[in-house]
Image: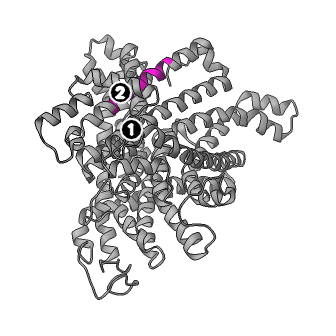
């Protein structure tokens, strides 16, 4: 177990390291000289040289990288174009997106797993066909468009929910949920479609497994057989899928926050591009990539806890 | 005639397989519908200049935000442009992004995946880590970065979508190569002294083709939606070039006045990606009986 976790953590560390290099080089590939931007109107070569020197831009790239990453490790991601600390901005915006993502995962998992289990148990029946068809629709529908349609229906026509904006949970718990209901539904539907398909096929596999037959032969009730034996083993698949869907969830959060005007991490990313704020963009992308790797490491850990076989065989490769 | 047909198919196993596949395909009405709709969208994309009643940028100032009528079947937008024509023209950007990003992803991912799966060892380990790094950058983040570096355009959006689709394809190709290297005909080729290149191109690659085709039909609709997202955010197709994503972005300002402007492009995206998904599901059932759902 310890060896397995160490190997996984080591691999994750390497990936984070490589990702940080990609981010660093990517930002250096951007057009425009930061010294020119910092010097504003002043193009005097002596001033330029002084700026380059004070920001360390005259040092070789590897030196710049080590300086940047060692600062980043201490939580210092530099100052954005408004001279505000990037780390602080990210810390204030991230919880909003995390709440949105949490609600979306909750909605997606509940709907997806439930529909998947029902479809598998009632295979070939009407409920199976309905669930399978809904999943196909859920996969094909552009979610941001679903968001627009929801705004038309529930905000413009019915006035049930606010069309956009955000209030914090601490200031106004009900208002907070009202504002996040449509966005998290939008973000959750895609996840639920993927999860429904995976849960259904995982459930079909475990329902035909020997231990389920044994459980039935023992005279256990169908409820216990499905809930305790089949579902528990299918949940292993579900955990992995949620981890792998995280990338889609991050992309989804960017556009969902754009549509519903939520001042979260996703909007921050777009703002950084639109305002050509490279220090901010660099910090945002680094945090997103690191977050993705860390969550997938946690998924691997959860996976090994749920499925002892992985630990024993050492999980050679995915 | 029937007799002659039967013998020829018995003699030629390829023709027999093709016939079997066609028979299985024809038994799946949803896959056929998917194929027809997908082909319709591709036709619209190619022949938009001929089919569309108006040019995509022709404005009619006598009919701003007009409802559907004989002149404008789906009405007009805020500049008096014909919505139907813009949807037909918009199919170009979607199909282009869908097909080319998938092709790009395949060209990059398949050789890498084959090498990883066939040679295993340290090469495999290195490629696995690189794939992990690629996965750590969601396609939207890559697109955001590319738009910042190279400027927003359909080409850059397509590249970003291709990079985004690559990791999954690398894993699929790797898994297939891993299984195929154990096949008897590959071992026989090795024993015959065939070169690695010959084995990979003549034996391994052709045998994973059906899996790759299924993967492509899954990747195309994802890329079509991805293109719409990027164009909606201003990171893809630039106005005045018509694109379903751009149309939705424009419609956002008229949600209360003319909600229909937001409905039609979305329906187009939905139908287009649904058709490819239906086709993909059908092809998977036919070509890959192992994964019947």
Q: From the image, which quarter does the N terminus of chain A lie in?
A: top right
Against B225, is A71 above or below? above
- From what the image shows, is residue A278 above or below residue A115? above
Q: How many marks?
A: 2
Left or right: residue B92 versus residue B267 is left
Q: Are marks 2 and 1 in contact (CB under 8 Å)?
A: no
Q: Is residue A13 magenta?
A: yes
Q: Residue at x 38, y 78 (%)?
A: B74
Magenta extent:
A10-23
- Circle 2 packing at 10 Å, graded few (<14), some (14-19), many (20+), is some
Residue A63 in view here? yes
Would residue A229 be found to the left or right of residue B148 on screen? right
Residue at the disc numbered 2:
A68
The disc numbered 2 marks a residue on which chain? A
The residue depicted at 32 percent of the width and 38 percent of the height is B106
Which of B169/A13 is in front?
Answer: A13
| Residue B177 visible in image | no
């Amino acid at each position: 177990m310890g060896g397995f976790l160490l190997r996984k953590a080591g691999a994750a560390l390497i990936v984070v390291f490589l990702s940080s290099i990609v981010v660093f080089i990517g930002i250096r590939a951007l057009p425009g000289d930061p010294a020119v931007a910092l010097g504003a109107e002043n193009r005097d070569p002596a001033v330029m040289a002084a700026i380059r020197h004070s920001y360390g831009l005259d040092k070789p790239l590897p030196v710049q990288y080590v300086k940047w990453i060692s600062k980043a490790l201490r939580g210092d991601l530099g100052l954005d174009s408004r001279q505000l600390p990037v780390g602080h901005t990210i810390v204030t915006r991230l919880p909003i997106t995390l709440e949105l993502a949490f609600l979306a995962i909750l909605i997606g998992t509940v709907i997806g797993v439930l529909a998947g289990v029902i479809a598998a148990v009632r295979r070939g029946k009407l409920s199976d066909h309905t669930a399978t068809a809904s999943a196909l629709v859920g996969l094909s529908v552009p979610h941001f468009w679903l968001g627009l349609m929801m705004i038309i229906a529930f905000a413009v026509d019915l006035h049930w929910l606010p069309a956009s904006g955000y209030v914090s949970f601490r200031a106004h718990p009900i208002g907070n949920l009202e504002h996040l209901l449509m966005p998290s539904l939008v973000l959750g539907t895609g996840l639920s479609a993927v999860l429904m398909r995976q849960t259904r096929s995982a459930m079909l596999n475990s329902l035909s497994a020997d231990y389920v037959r044994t459980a039935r032969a023992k005279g256990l009730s169908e409820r216990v057989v499905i809930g305790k034996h089949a579902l528990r083993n299918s949940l292993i698949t579900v955990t992995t899928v949620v981890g792998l869907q995280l990338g889609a969830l991050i992309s989804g959060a960017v556009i969902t926050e754009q549509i519903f005007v939520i001042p979260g991490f996703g909007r921050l990313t777009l703002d950084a591009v639109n305002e050509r704020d490279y220090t901010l963009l660099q910090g945002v992308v680094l945090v997103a990539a690191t977050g993705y790797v860390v969550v997938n490491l946690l998924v691997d850990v959860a996976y090994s806890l749920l499925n002892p076989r992985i630990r024993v065989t050492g999980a050679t490769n995915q | 005639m029937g007799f002659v047909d039967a013998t020829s198919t018995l003699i030629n196993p390829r023709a027999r397989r093709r016939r079997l596949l066609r028979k299985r395909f024809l038994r799946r009405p949803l896959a056929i519908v998917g194929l027809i709709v997908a082909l319709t969208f591709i036709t619209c994309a190619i022949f938009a200049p001929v089919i569309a009643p108006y040019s995509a940028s022709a404005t009619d100032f006598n009919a701003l935000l007009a409802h559907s009528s004989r002149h404008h079947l789906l009405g007009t937008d805020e500049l008096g442009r014909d919505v139907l024509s813009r949807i037909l023209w918009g199919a170009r950007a979607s199909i282009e992004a869908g097909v080319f990003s998938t092709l790009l992803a395949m060209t990059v991912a398949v050789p890498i995946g084959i090498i990883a799966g066939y040679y295993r060892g340290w090469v495999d380990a290195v490629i696995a880590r690189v794939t992990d790094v690629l996965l750590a950058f969601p396609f939207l983040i890559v697109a955001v970065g590319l738009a910042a570096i190279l400027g927003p355009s359909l080409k850059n959006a397509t590249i970003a979508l291709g990079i985004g689709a690559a990791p999954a394809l690398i894993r699929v190709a790797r898994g297939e190569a891993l299984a195929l290297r154990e096949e008897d005909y590959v071992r026989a080729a090795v024993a015959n002294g065939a070169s690695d290149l010959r084995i990979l191109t003549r034996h391994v690659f052709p045998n994973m083709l059906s899996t790759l085709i299924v993967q492509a039909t899954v990747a195309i609709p994802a890329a079509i939606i991805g293109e719409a997202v990027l164009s909606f955010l201003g990171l893809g197709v630039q106005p005045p070039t018509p694109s379903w994503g751009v149309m939705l972005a424009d419609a956002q300002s008229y949600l209360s006045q003319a909600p229909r402007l937001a409905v039609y492009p979305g329906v187009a995206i939905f139908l287009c990606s649904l058709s490819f998904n239906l086709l993909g599901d059908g092809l998977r059932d036919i070509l890959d009986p192992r994964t019947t759902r």
